[in-house]
Image (spheres, rainbow, N blue to C red):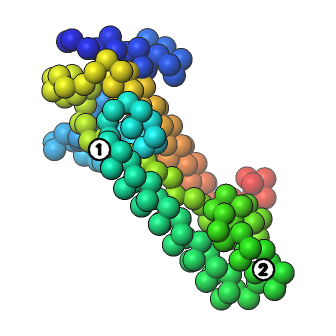
Amino acid sequence: MQGFEHVVSGARELHLEPTEIAEAMLVTTDADPEQVGEPVMGYPRFPVEAAREAGLVDNDEHDRIVGEARAETSLRIHSALETAKRSRFAAVDMESLLEAANDPVRFQTVANDLGLRFWISLAWWTWPVGSIVEALSAGALSPEQLEVLGREWARQVRLTLERDMHSAWTKAMWKAIADRGEPDSGDV
């Protein structure tokens, strides 16, 4: 299939073994309707800046996505401040939060140091492609875009696999504990 070498080249940037690259290229975002369970993974997501640099989004879409992320971060700052007020934080802590409210990075540091859950919304672009084969069959992507797709697709597959392995380990651990009965202090 024409262009596949560019997809593989992008995936190689992650220093994967050839078999890992081959496996990643076979994954699709759709679950077989006959198969039980969830889809293997969602569409690949990556920073909108990288999408713009690769020519996948134009300046208007880039600016819209960045604006949405900033607006979401502002809402989270407001929500964290409201939580702090309801929790009756000390005046000095509230003052620190209020002083940092216009600087999301500083606010995140102060909020997290005080035990408030807060994170900055990042500007991510979702590439609505169901598989590598689908993207290659469409034929409208440049070699550079195919390299970005290969890298981000392989990264998404790796993250999905790690998440699923962690979930399976956690389920197995809790099942083993449940099968044994109550955990004792040596289990912790």
Residue at 44 percent across and 36 percent down: it is: 50
Label 1 residue SS? loop
- Name which residue type carries label 2: Glu
- Residue 44: x percent and y percent? 36, 39
Find residue 187 and report its horizontal and vertical position in percent: 73, 52
Type of the residue with mark 1 = Pro
Placement of the N terminus among the 4 image quadrants: top left
- Residue 95, which numbered label? 2
- Residue 9's image quarter? top left
Image check: 62 left or right of 87? left
**Around disc 1, counting alpha carbons within 10 Å, would you say few (fewer than 14), some (14 to 19), or many (20 or more)?**
few
Q: Is residue 151 left or right of residue 43?
A: right
Quarter of the image containing the C terminus?
A: bottom right
Q: Earlier in the sequence, mark 2 or mark 1?
A: 1
Q: Residues within 10 Å of mark 2 (few under 14, many from 20)?
A: few
Residue found 78% across the figure and 80% down from its top: 95
- Element carrying mark 2: helix
Q: Which mark is residue 39?
A: 1
The reply to whether residue 133 is visible in this rendering is no
